[in-house]
Amino acid sequence: MAKRNISLLVFLIIGIQLFGQDYTLEKCKTLALKNNLSIKESKLKIDAAKELKKNAFTNYFPKVSASASLFKSSKSLLEIETPEMNLPVYDGNPENLVNPTQFAYIPSFSIETLDYTNSAALTAIQPLYAGGRIKIGNKLATLNKDVQELQHDLNVSEIMVKTEAYYWNLVALNEKKKTIENYQTLLQNLHKEVNDFYEAGLTQKSNVLKVKLELNKIEGNKLKLTNGIDVLKMVFAQHLGLEDYQNLSVLDSIIDIKKPSVYYQEPQIAIKNRKETALLNKAVEAEVLQKKLSSGEHLPELGVGVGGLYLDVAYNSDFYGVVFASLSIPISDWWGGSHKRKEHNFKIEMAKNNLEEKSQLMQIQISKEYKTLTESYKQIEIAQTSLNQSNEYLQELEDTYDAGLTNLSDLLEAKAINQEAKDALIDAKSKYKINIAKYLLALGNYSVLQD
């Protein structure tokens, strides 16, 4: 029983390796969201911005600091030495003050001290007013987090559009591979038929060679196509974070095609949804906050604090508690600060002008992408018309060839034209799918997991 289970497991593993894994567009997007290195990096930037915001919030709380110092000198800093002396003694009689009759003997002595000092201090300072810089600093930290989140969302949308481009290009190459294989089968059947005619003496050998040359040409094109598919799979697998590209296969075919009008939106309205518009507004907001922050540097600062000091010096030690307040008023910086404020005013105007300019350019981009979309849709119609005409032309030549009224060269040319028409239609449809994604991205309307 165990052997049967092991055999079944081996069969399933081999089956997966042989037949590969089929990926829908939505599955590819999910993998890109999870594994793409660029998206991972933008997530890390958001995490870093969140930590920066938390760090800015700590500025509302008291700043606590501790310090300690130990000092030992090779010799005493204070040395006092007195000679021996006789000091007059006051006996109570004022007349004896000038000419004392009694003296007290004091021997010489020396004092050496202050050869060491030990101290420790602990202080806590609570800022009461700092020109609004703490509040503005927290706003800037929040704004930075918002910017990183917008950048992440924009990056995700761009990665998803890139995912669609890889996906639909791979679908197109797979479709081309099917058509070239079908064309190859038709030529092989034609080669067998012409060769039979040649062996029966009903046609010339040159006709056999013509078909053979066309088969060789198709074989070369098929090899190039296969190599192109492998290279695209390598790039796509790296984009999705997959280690094995060989078993990467896509499920969809390019069938569902909607008209461009389904996706249309007015450019003036669309730019409001653009992440770039939000980022440009954040840039203006950042310059306004930077101006306020700079102005706060030239306002008074007020704080209160408490502390404790332990001091051990000259064989005496004690602990001292202190409370204090500090007020700092910048005076000489006021003149320079006026120029700094003017500089920030110019930067604010520059940010507003940049917002206006980029908004106009985004409207132009949206219009351009829609024109590209309508053009690619028109290319589908043209390619479909060409394919219909080439099918009709090929059918007519096949009928006349079977009746002996058309030579083989004309038939081969008609088949080649038909093959090119099929490839052109595949290319047109895949480009249209990609252009839809690009247009939705330009609208700011791109849904990460959309159909």
Image (spheres, rainbow, N blue to C red):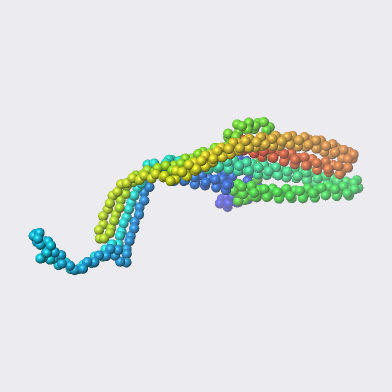
Q: Residue at x 61, y 47 (%)?
A: 239
Q: Residue at x 67, y 36 (%)?
A: 368
Instruction: Please state which of residues 347 and 82 is positioned toward the viewer in this rendering.
Output: 82
Q: Residue at x 71, y 36 (%)?
A: 375
Residue 195, visible in the rendered structure: no
Instruction: Please state which of residues 334 and 200 is positioned toward the viewer in this rendering.
Output: 334
Give coordinates of residue 433: x percent, y percent: 67, 38
Q: Residue at x 56, y 37 (%)?
A: 352
Give coordinates of residue 164: x percent, y percent: 64, 41
Residue 311 drawn above or below residue 250:
below
Residue 445 drawn above or below residue 308:
above
Instruction: Please state which of residues 186 and 300 is positioned toward the viewer in this rendering.
Output: 300
The quarter of the displayed image where residue 104 is located? bottom left
Give coordinates of residue 175: x percent, y percent: 71, 42
Left-right relation of 384 to 140:
right
Left-right relation of 203 to 68:
right
Q: Which quarter shows the C terminus?
A: top right
Residue 432, visible in the rendered structure: yes
Give coordinates of residue 53: x percent, y percent: 46, 43
Q: How many marks?
A: 0
Q: Residue furthest right?
A: 201
